[in-house]
Image (cartoon, rainbow, N blue to C red):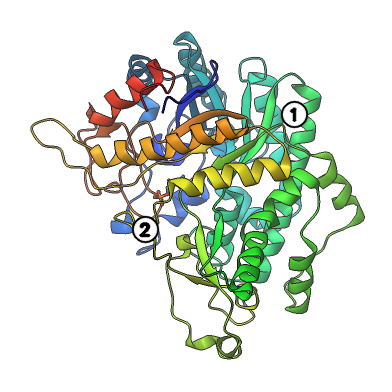
Amino acid sequence: MIMKFPNDFLWGAASAAYQVEGAYNEDGKGLSIWDEFSQIKGKTKHNTNGKVAVDFYHHYQEDIKLMAEMGLKAYRFSISWSRILPNGEGEINQAGLDFYERVIDELLKNDIEPIVTLYHWDLPEKLQTKYGGWENRKLVDLFVEYCRILFEKFGAKIKYWVTFNEQNVFTSLGYRWASHPPNVSDTKRMFQANHVVNLANAKVIQLFHKLVPNEKIGPSFGYGEVYPLTSSPADVLAAVNANQFNNDWWLDVYCRGYYPEKILRLLKKLHLDFEITAEDLKVLKAGKPDFLGINYYHGGTVKAPDFEKVKNQKDFDKTDPYLMAADKQAASPESYLFESVENPYLDKTNWGWEIDPIGFRIALRQVYEKYQLPIMITENGLGAFDKLEDGKINDQYRIDYLNDHLVQVGKAIADGVPVLGFCAWSFTDLLSWLNGYDKRYGFVYIDRDDYSAENLTRIKKQSFYWYQKIIESNGGKL
Ligand code: BG6
């Protein structure tokens, strides 16, 4: 079957500042919460951190040259807030602005559309210590001020802006599971912080529409469709609940300006509710995005909750927070809604993430039918162990993964979903937040490991040449 992609489809790849840049304290950059958090022993694999990462800060010209050679049409990257404002507020670090200007100009010179993420998890440390981070409403205005600087400086050069990357992930892992900064394990505080981020998202979108009226902005959401384990109505209801809790809880707010009622009521019952003022509701309604960024890795499968277990929640054991398992704390909202189970039909990656290309088509259809906004695929890719043999990396498994997922994107487009582009995660290998440098995602191998960053040589993998052909044929070779 020949896939038809729009002529201006943005064949891209993505990254995030902390995961690639390095130069963590160079040229006036302030520290971020990740620079601090990664210093706590045992929090990341082999205590890896982003001090050097893959040193994009000094290798950006070389990397963009490789992007141009590949024929890439778009590159999504994030701006590190503390490179622009070392204290998160106050004085601007001109060297930081200059760096991003050089990157943007280099991309444009090579006909690569820059897609800028304003926040990919690296909050300036000073805002955490001084104000308590996202739990404080003060952060809304501070985020808006930081973004104003970028809109004024780069508004004329950037067409696509992403507000927050995976708000669902960084609030849950940061405030509920203590596996990201600020290392908090408190479900109530998570919902409070999440509400503040929602306000920041909506306010910044409003400002953008005023300052940069002709370009587009939207959040990137980590979406996964949740399936019922069986056709038993109780399991189907559990899946409806899970989709509301895992997906609508964020997407309804972004696109409609209100929270799903069922979940709000449950939170109230469990004393996990948070303050929503009349003014907040106005703000949320007024900040509608122009497109939705979707990061897709996997969904989930659920069955009806076992209420006997709910009564005795201490018996639950701990699982990987990335896998969207139900909360194990007392008063876990999930345990009233659904119970996560394995899907017997799906294979898994080396890291236990389910592989589900058809779920991608389902996700794109569901999101579009519900919210009627164009979709930018801001992430999708495979984390795997790659082997460098005779100077080559044969990553056929990555080619298969991406090919299968892109075929489903093509089908979703044929179904009528307006997809603006596809940013593979990632262009070069980079630091996995919790899993170090061995969990590789790139088309370009970076010669470094968890212990040494001496080499940093860039080597094109087999998937590099495959994606080059896909781009050249505008998806015809899928
Ligand atoms: C997404 C993030 O959650 O998944 C990326 O936006 C991240 O920053 C990617 O790297 C893959 O996650 P991991 O844990 O495999 O690095």
Mark 1 vs 2: CB contact within 8 A? no
Q: Which element type, helix, strand or loop, lies under badge 1?
A: helix
Foreground tag (1 vs 2): 1
Q: Which amino acid does label 1 sit on?
A: Phe
Q: Residue at x 37, y 48 (%)?
A: 432
Q: Which residue lies furthest to the top in this view?
A: 109
**Residue 476 spot, x, y in % from top left:** 40, 21
Q: Which element type, helix, strand or loop, lies under badge 2?
A: loop
Q: Tell me if 158 is positioned left or right of 263 in this view.
A: left
- Residue 208: mark: 1
Which of the pair 453/372 is nearer the observer?
Answer: 372
Q: In which quarter of the image is the N terminus?
A: top left
On screen, 366 above or below 249? above
On screen, 132 above or below 101? below
Q: Is residue 452 visible?
A: yes
Q: Which residue is drawn at 45% across and 14% down?
A: 106
Q: Earlier in the sequence, mark 1 or mark 2?
A: 2
Q: Which residue is drawn at 77% across and 67% down?
A: 262
**Residue 44 spot, x, y in % from top left:** 36, 58
**Residue 324 spot, x, y in % from top left:** 51, 63
**Residue 220 spot, x, y in % from top left:** 59, 41
Q: What residue type is labelled 2?
A: Thr
Q: Can residue 131 be seen in this view?
A: no
Q: Residue furthest left?
A: 390
Which of the pair 172/129 is nearer the observer?
Answer: 172
- Residue 44: mark: 2
On screen, 458 above or below 451? above
Callout 1: few (<14), some (14-19), or many (20+) C-alpha neighbours within 10 Å? many
